Amino acid sequence: MERSFDARLQLILPRLKPTQIIPPAECPYEGCQGRHLCLYQQVTKPLKDTVYRAVEAYRYRCLACRRTFRVYPEGATNAHISSRVKALAVMLYFLGLSYEATSLTLEALGAYMCKSSVYEAVQETAQRVPGLKRREVFEGVRTGAARSDVTSVKCKGQWLSLCLAATDIDRTILTMDLLPGEEAQTLRDWMEPVIEAVGMQLLVGRLSPVDVEEGGAKA
């Protein structure tokens, strides 16, 4: 029988494109749907994100009903937390961490969410994926005293490193190394509905012997 290999699991978080705002085609207010809109104001919106601390939103005025509304760049909404931070929180919770442990992990990775915000994000996703159950993959969390963008989770008695890194201007990846290969594939199959619901992508790759000897590939 072929030996179980160690694997790297990479979660590609939803993109945040702060400069890409699609102009609206019609007024969003019920009973109006006017098509004559004008850019009224550009406003700065504070944001909790893995990279950005604020984005620019466009405020439009409908010339039919005279009301205004905001349009946000891809990856941001009227919420104060970006879509990718919410997606990360949801995934950590469904992998077995408690609301508190998820909040602590996010803080260690530089993307803090309070417990109540984690709960709200999880409930929103659960409504879109009915019947989904949590899996006790992560048994605990170990974080450093200060933010390092790296923390550890316990999986079947073994501490695995989690590393959050931006690979380019708008892509952020969470990497977890040294997961048994067969378990990684099983986990991938189970995670697919959650991944689709929160707009993530998942890659499962095989680690080389050198990576394993060095304790996992470097992010």
Image: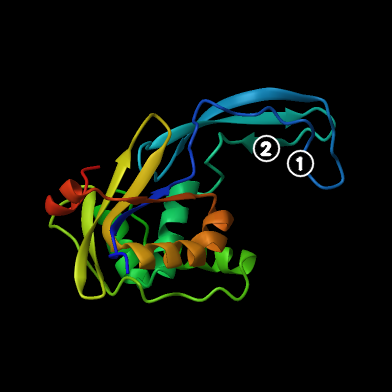
Q: Are marks 1 and 2 in contact (CB under 8 Å)?
A: yes
* Residue nearer the viewer, 211 or 155: 211
Amino acid type shown at disc 2 = Phe
Taking 100 as reference, is 89 left or right?
Answer: right
Depth check, mark 1 against mark 2: the one in front is: 1
Q: Quadrant of residue 108?
A: bottom left
Instruction: Using the rendered image of the protein, determine whether residue 144 is visible from the camera's viewpoint.
Output: yes
Which residue was labeled with disc 1? 28
Secondary structure category for the residue under label 2: strand
Mark drawn on residue 69: 2
What color scheme is it?
Answer: rainbow
What separation in Å lies between label 1 and label 2 (alpha carbons)? 8 Å
Coordinates of residue 80 in the picture (x, y in percent): 47, 48
Coordinates of residue 164 in the picture (x, y in percent): 30, 47
Instruction: Using the rendered image of the protein, determine whether residue 80 is visible from the camera's viewpoint.
Output: no
Coordinates of residue 25 in the picture (x, y in percent): 77, 30
x 67%, y 37%: residue: 69
Q: Residue furthest front?
A: 1
Coordinates of residue 141 in the picture (x, y in percent): 24, 67
Secondary structure category for the residue under label 1: loop
x 52%, y 30%: residue: 43
* Residue nearer the viewer, 5 or 8: 5
Residue 205 higher or lower than 169, as above or below: below
x 61%, y 67%: residue: 129
Taking 123 as reference, is 47 left or right?
Answer: left
* Residue nearer the viewer, 179 or 50: 179
Amino acid type shown at disc 1 = Pro
| Numbered marks: total | 2
Mark drawn on residue 124: none
Where's the N terminus, which quadrant?
bottom left
x 56%, y 36%: residue: 74
Where's the C terminus, which quadrant?
top left
